[in-house]
Image (spheres, rainbow, N blue to C red):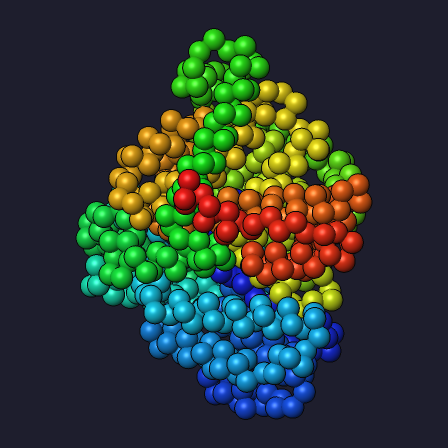
Amino acid sequence: MSFSTSIKKILNPKVTCIAAAVMALSLNTQAMDHKAFKQAMKELPKGDASEQLIALQDLRYRWLMESYPESATYRGYPGMEENWTDQSSKGIERRKGQVRDLLAASRHLNKNKLNDDQQLDYQLLYQDLLEDVKGYQFPDHLLPVNHMSGIQRSVPGVLNAMPKNNASDYDHILERLEKLPELIEQTQGLMERGLEQKLTPPQITLRDLPGQIRALIPAEPKQSPLLKAFYDMPGSISASQQKRLQSRAQSIYEKSLKPAWQAFAEFVEREYVPNATTETAFTKNTDGIRWYAHKVGEQTTTDLSPEEIHRIGLQEVRRIRNEMDAIIRKTGFDGDFKAFTEFLRTDPQFYFDSKEELLKNYRDIAKRIDGELPKLFATLPRLPYGVKPIPSYAEKSQTTAYYQPGSNEAGRAGVFYANTYNLKSRPTWEMEALTVHEAMPGHHLQIALAQEQKDIHPLRRNTMYTAFVEGWGLYSESLGYDLGLYKDPYNEFGALTYDMWRAVRLVVDTGMHQLGWSRDEAIAYFKNNSAKPEHDIVVEIDRYLVWPGQALAYKVGQMQIQEIRARAEEALGNNFNIRQFHDALLGAGALPLNVLEQRMNGWIDAQGGKISGAPPVAEAAGQAALN
């Protein structure tokens, strides 16, 4: 995938199954300052464990929505439309203290008094809070911007996600625009502190960053992504109101927004990039070995070490390479692997001549998939999705595609964003696997279903564990065969290329950050084992450099889900039902891998199956490390 780290952080809440509690949260539109938080902590119930849990979940959800107003926008949580996250040092430290308070309160809850469903709620609440607090030992906040994420990427998306139904909605957008220079100033302050501590993303990855920022402030205000909403207003807003809103938007743009972004671009160009580290290994940072290990554990939700993951990756690369060689033989191609991948990268038959053709083909594939889904799923989401091009201001340094979740509360469909930049790097043979991953039955199906689970707390409905979400997306690619895809051997090779892509990630991410590989060595390894175009490979490698550990979650999650399915098939035999299995796997929303395994073992047992004791990925990795 896919959807960026900034988006995932935005969508990292949880929520209660008690309708009255949800209503109370929704009706509270006053932002929670420190005094209000302390008062809410004092008012937490002291008696019944179930009441305590619900109150803690409610408070945690409210805290997330009101501490991160961008999050509230994506979720349709009211009252936060005019605000941005407080990125001042005081604001960051205040939030850390509040999370520590929530963790301390959760420790006093008698979990033995909870029923099975509540035990799961408590386990996830406690585990998430503990993970946050563990992360506070590392200065992640001093790395707020890179070419993949940061305010230059997130701000246009948040503005675009805001409601736009009436003049009042547009007034909220204007209020947010007026407060944007303060967020830019706070972000620059964090970056300056990072420079002082010699903590920045690798310099080589920042080459497009100034251009990304300047793309937000063209000479003509109408062309700015920041003001896009003001030139596409609904007819329900009168002409006079539209004129007023456009005039104010242009004034804010010229007087404050443009100068603020321009100054930020100059800081990045003249100070930040020239003084950024030339090291590429994340472990070269102060305490980098422990920091990287923490990121690996946080992203994969396992105890796997970087070295274990590296060995798993090498094994997977070998396995997939053998399958790819078999496909090459099936096509009758006269040449070796290198020649075949060069053929796939360069032959015109695999490329479209226009962006419109590319998008149309993605939409056609999506429509074909939709008609086959009931064979594999008993429950499908109600929320629709669309296919759109990645915005031009971000496309050059963005990955092949990503998914942006929708929201029934906000009245917004999910979106599969496809990259139409440089059409000669967008081959047709990757399109089926990519659509399955990003849309259906991948991210849209899983995330929309989680959001529609009304019997679990909003906190859990909207939580994104990368290993589960991305593991499911990659597992979904394997379902393409059941959905009638990959009939063309080139498309089948494309599916294997995508599987190889994620296996290579295990090798090169750990290789660069843990084992001393150079960026060029990582690019060469990727190119030698994949048919992906070189532009995509470079973009991917630079992604791993600025998001260390994140890309490991895909393959680790996929392997865990595949292992659980194999275990279920073996235990249940002829009684195994793929539709029921998928419903059980997705029915509790996203889960950490350790929790997912426990839950699915219970489901297999409830279906009358006997688990043979096959090792989970973490244990299998231990064996791999010895081989």
* Residue 16 visible at all: no
Q: Is residue 83 left or right of residue 285?
A: right
Q: Residue at x 75, y 46 (%)?
A: 572
**Residue 280: x, y in percent?**
27, 46
* Residue 461 visible at all: yes
Say above or below: 149 vs 396.
below
Q: Residue at x 64, y 68 (%)?
A: 120
Query: How many labels, in total?
Result: 0
Say above or below: 75 vs 324.
below
**Residue 393: x, y in percent?**
43, 43
Q: Is residue 441 left or right of residue 210?
A: right
Say above or below: 264 vs 371.
below
User: Which sits in the foreground, 17 or 427?
Assistant: 17
Query: Looking at the rendering, in which quadrant would you find the C terminus?
Result: top left
Q: Residue at x 45, y 69 (%)?
A: 132
**Residue 300: x, y in percent?**
48, 54
Q: Residue at x 30, y 52 (%)?
A: 282
Say above or below: 123 vs 576.
below
**Residue 20: x, y in percent?**
73, 78
User: Which sits in the foreground, 95 or 594?
Assistant: 594
